[in-house]
Amino acid sequence: MSTFTVGIDIGGTSVRAAVIDANGAIVNRAREMTPASAAATEDLLVDLVRHLQATHPISGVGLAVAGFISTDRQRVMFAPHLAWRDAQVPAILSARLDLPVVMDHDVNSAVWAEYHLGAAAGSPVALLIALGTGIGAGLVVDGQIYRGAHGVAPELGHLTVVPGGRSCPCGKRGCWERYCSGTALAATGVDRWREAGREIPDELADSEVTGTVVARTAAEGDPQALAAVDELGHWLGIGMGLAADVLDPEVIVIGGGVSDAAPLYLPRALDTMRQTITGGVHRPHPRIEVARYGDRSAVIGAGLLAQHALVASG
């Protein structure tokens, strides 16, 4: 049997596919925009796998999906930025490709890659916090991904950290991700520039300011952008302290798009976590690492999960 699998990261904007070898290396890749309909998305996934099959013998496929996945990982129950609703995606694709297909949440896939080959390698309890548009989280306990009773754990991004605070698309107010994510960094940066009575750098419209823009401007020394990044670090520390109290991880890995700016905010985050963690001076603290694979972790993890399933099935 071939040791090559295809990992596919299916997001609301783009679909990224890659051939993954037994060492977790990407040996070929492809990327397309995410279609609007379920049928078109399935057609695209089939086309991507067949394209990659032309270069390497593929033994299985792993899907990393940004959405709620059933406990048995056979159904996409709901994905806010994808067309699937209660869809048996692995079975549909397996029948069309004549290959075994496995599926998991995108951050579960990411933490699997970091646990096996990355910043959390071999850790008994590893938590990955993905800072992007929102906050995603994945947890590995004793070599197993922890998914909860209904497949949706750990939903850390929607812990309330500011009662009555910023509104969140989930319907609540004051969620952690509204203060600690790429979206939050952009909003805080705009607030700080306005409070200082300054023009937004490069005369950007509010809608064009992203977390990446704020982080880049902070790295260039802009005081308001630095203040915004420092505030993100504060809220990251608050959330890591809460997660450490509940989960007691040996390591917390920071991933997602905002992880590129980690040197700017991790010192503040570590200081805040140490001040807020329960019994902080009397207990070991989790070590904090930046994800080794960055935005490639979900693709790599999906391919590794497919390999793991093949080994388990004999």
Image (tube, grey):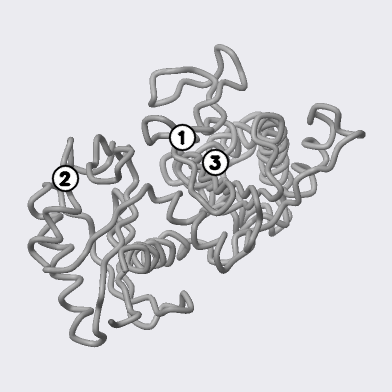
Which badge, 3 or 1, is on the more N-terminal residue?
1
Q: Quadrant of residue 149?
A: top left
- What is the secondary structure assignment of the residue under circle 3? loop
Q: Amino acid at mark 2?
A: Gln
Residue 274 at x, y = what percent?
Answer: 83, 37
Which badge, 2 or 3, is on the more N-terminal residue?
2
Do callouts 2 and 3 mark residues in contact (Cβ within 8 Å)?
no
Q: Which residue is mark 2?
A: 88
Q: CA distance from mark 3 to mark 1?
A: 19 Å
Q: How many marks?
A: 3
Residue 239 at x, y = what percent?
Answer: 65, 33
Identify whether 211 is placed above or below 6: above
On residue 153, the disc is 1
Q: Nearer the viewer, residue 52 or 168?
A: 52
Identify whether 301 is placed above or below 212: below
Q: Nearer the viewer, residue 173 or 207?
A: 173
Instruction: Determine whether, in the image, residue 235 is placed left or right of residue 23.
Output: right
Which badge, 2 or 1, is on the more N-terminal residue?
2
Identify whether 70 is placed above or below 132: above
Q: CA distance from mark 2 to mark 3?
A: 31 Å
Q: Which residue is mark 3?
A: 181
Q: Amino acid at mark 3?
A: Ser
